[in-house]
């Protein structure tokens, strides 16, 4: 028995392997690769990083990504410190934070699949969380599809933010079906 047990894969190892195989591979615009847990809003988070960021924040650096399994999938503490931001580990971070270096903006992106967008309450929470930032704040709500956008349309706080949804066009990328408000107003490229 002692010789046999070390050669047998444990149930824990088997589950770990299955979980790792189902993870979503993601590559940031700067070439950094990592994985997100499968399911939930992580499919949308991957699209935000791989499709939205290169288009709307060219040259930007992804400095934070939240994951359902691991809240801090990416956390560039050095950049946050340089920008004058001290983040509480228990703070309600947005799903993705991108530092648009050229314009010195922090683009705070909420990925909406099953819970709400940047509404007036969430807007104030994010402003408080990022108070002291030396970079300007840009608030973005992203949706996986138009159906979800329509579900939350009445809740969105339209002041100082943009909205984007995926799936408006035949090809598979984050499309700008409803890029509104601040994206055009602050000089980001129009879709």
Image: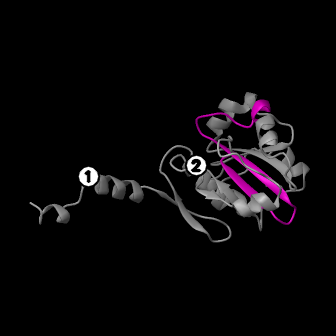
Judge from the rendering whether residue 145 lies leftward or rightward of residue 188; answer left or right: left
Quadrant of residue 55 within the rendered picture = bottom right
Quadrant of residue 149 within the rendered picture = top right
Crowding at label 1, few (<14), some or many (≥20) Cα neighbours within 10 Å?
A: few
Residue identifier under label 2: 71
Residue at screen point 65% across, 39% down: 146
Residue in front for this viewpoint, 125 or 166:
125
In which quadrant of the rendered image does the N terminus lie?
bottom left
Quadrant of residue 63 within the rendered picture = bottom right
Residue 171 showing in the rendered view: no
Judge from the rendering whether residue 187 lies leftward or rightward of residue 42; answer left or right: right
Residue 154 showing in the rendered view: yes
Q: Is residue 25 above or below residue 71?
A: below
- In the rendered image, residue 171, in percent from the top left (x then y), is placed at 61, 57
Judge from the rendering whether residue 78 lies leftward or rightward of residue 190; answer left or right: left
Q: Secondary structure at mark 2?
A: loop
- In the rendered image, residue 51, in percent from the top left (x then y), is placed at 66, 59
Crowding at label 2, few (<14), some or many (≥20) Cα neighbours within 10 Å?
A: some
Residue in front for this viewpoint, 92 or 1:
1
Residue at screen point 68% across, 41% down: 91
Colouring chosen for the image of the structure: one colour
* Magenta-span inclusion, residue 85: no
Residue identifier under label 1: 11
Q: Which residues are magenta?
A: 94-122
* Magenta-span inclusion, residue 101: yes
Residue in front for this viewpoint, 178 or 185:
185
């Amino acid at each position: 028995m002692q010789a046999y047990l070390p050669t047998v894969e444990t149930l824990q190892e088997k589950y770990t392997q299955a979980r790792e195989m189902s993870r979503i591979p993601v590559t940031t615009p700067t070439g950094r690769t990592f994985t997100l847990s499968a399911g939930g809003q992580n499919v949308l988070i991957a699209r935000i990083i791989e499709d939205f960021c290169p288009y709307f924040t060219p040259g930007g650096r992804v400095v934070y990504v939240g994951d359902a399994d691991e809240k801090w999938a990416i956390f560039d503490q050095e950049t946050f410190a340089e920008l004058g931001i001290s983040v509480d580990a228990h703070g309600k971070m947005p799903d993705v934070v991108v530092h648009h270096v050229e314009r010195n903006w922090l683009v705070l992106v909420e990925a909406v699949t099953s819970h709400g967008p940047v509404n007036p309450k969430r807007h104030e929470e994010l402003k408080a969380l990022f108070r002291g930032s030396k970079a300007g704040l840009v608030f973005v709500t992203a949706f996986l599809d138009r159906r979800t956008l329509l579900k939350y349309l009445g809740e969105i706080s339209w002041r100082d933010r943009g909205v984007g949804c995926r799936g408006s066009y035949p090809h598979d990328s984050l499309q700008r079906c409803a890029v509104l408000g601040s994206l055009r107003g602050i000089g980001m490229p129009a879709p």
